[in-house]
């Protein structure tokens, strides 16, 4: 039998710790711990009433056109994972999500599946970065969300809704670039320097929105991507063929 839901019945925590309500790709444990090298102290499946899952954070149109956040909607409920982090790790999480250049942080009351109520921070697209309407995310991004939902045993009906979300179709080359870039994001996160990838993505986003001629954009993309993709390719080859790499 679940405990009565009241404001006087919150989850226990230290004064310093911060609860974050993950609703997007951060539901995937490898994503959150790997990308920003975070230590998750506790996690619980939970839901937030009066809000919906939105794909309205403007990304890079040809690479990752949209990212997830929440938006108020009285008739909806968004499910996710309530995670407890130290202030230092929460600051790293914020930095890995673009700092103050992508998301606003909303304090909300989240209810766990066991009936506990907890104030938590959830990410919402900044007004300046918000798309006029939701745009389908990439399959890569959606699969992180779907897998995270299943690993955390979210509500089956909600998982069905996630499975029904359409995705943006990328070409083979764009898909490869995306995989290599996010390999690097995880690598830099594990090394404790997520700012490097944040800088790269902010730069790519600026080029995407710059209005420059196609040739100029292509040159800037090449300048930004060539070093990163070269390193990522080497790391992937070493991962696929570790014995050969050691012999070399």
Image (cartoon, rainbow, N blue to C red):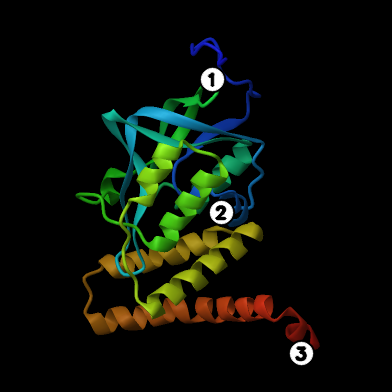
Observer-side mark, 1 or 3, equals 1
Identify whether 172 is placed above or below 206. Answer: below
Q: Earlier in the sequence, mark 1 or mark 3?
A: 1
Q: Please give the residue where the numbered disc 2 appears in the rendered image.
A: 31
Q: Please give the residue where the numbered disc 3 appears in the rendered image.
A: 248
Q: Which of marks 2 and 1 is nearer the N terminus?
A: 2
User: Label 2 to label 3, Cα distance in Å?
Assistant: 31 Å
Q: Earlier in the sequence, mark 2 or mark 3?
A: 2
Q: Please give the residue where the numbered disc 1 appears in the rendered image.
A: 116
Decide if residue 231 is in sight here.
yes
Q: Which residue is more in the foreground, 225 or 146?
A: 146
Observer-side mark, 2 or 1, equals 1
Residue 72, by quadrant, is: top left
Secondary element at tag 3: loop
Residue drawn 49% across the image and 29% down it: 120
Residue drawn 54% across the image and 39% down it: 153
Image quadrant containing the C terminus: bottom right
The spot of residue 116 in percent (x, y) is 54, 20
124 vs 152, left or right, is: left
The spot of residue 229 in percent (x, y) is 51, 78
The spot of residue 221 in percent (x, y) is 37, 78
Image quadrant containing the N terminus: top right
Secondary element at tag 1: loop
């Amino acid at each position: 039998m679940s405990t009565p839901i009241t404001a006087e019945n919150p989850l226990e925590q230290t004064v310093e710790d911060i609860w974050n309500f993950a609703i997007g790709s951060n539901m995937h444990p490898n994503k959150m711990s790997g990308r920003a090298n975070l230590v998750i102290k506790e996690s619980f499946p939970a839901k937030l009433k009066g809000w919906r899952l939105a794909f309205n954070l403007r990304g890079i149109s040809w690479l990752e056109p949209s990212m997830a956040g929440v938006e108020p909607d009285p008739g909806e409920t968004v499910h996710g994972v309530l995670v407890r982090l130290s202030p230092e790790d929460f600051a790293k999480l914020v930095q890995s999500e673009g700092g103050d250049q992508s998301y606003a942080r909303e304090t909300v009351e989240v209810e766990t599946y066991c009936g506990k109520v907890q104030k938590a921070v959830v990410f919402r697209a900044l007004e300046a970065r918000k798309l006029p309407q939701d745009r389908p995310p990439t399959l890569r991004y959606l699969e992180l969300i779907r897998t995270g939902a299943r690993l955390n045993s979210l509500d089956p009906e909600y998982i069905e809704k996630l499975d029904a979300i359409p995705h943006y179709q990328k070409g083979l080359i764009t898909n490869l670039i995306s995989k290599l870039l996010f390999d690097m994001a995880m690598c830099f996160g594990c090394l404790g320097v997520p700012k490097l990838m944040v800088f790269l993505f902010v730069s790519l986003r600026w080029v995407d929105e710059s209005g420059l001629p196609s040739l100029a954009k292509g040159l800037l993309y090449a300048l930004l991507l060539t070093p990163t993709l070269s390193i990522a390719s080497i790391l992937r080859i070493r991962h696929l063929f570790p014995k050969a790499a050691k012999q070399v």
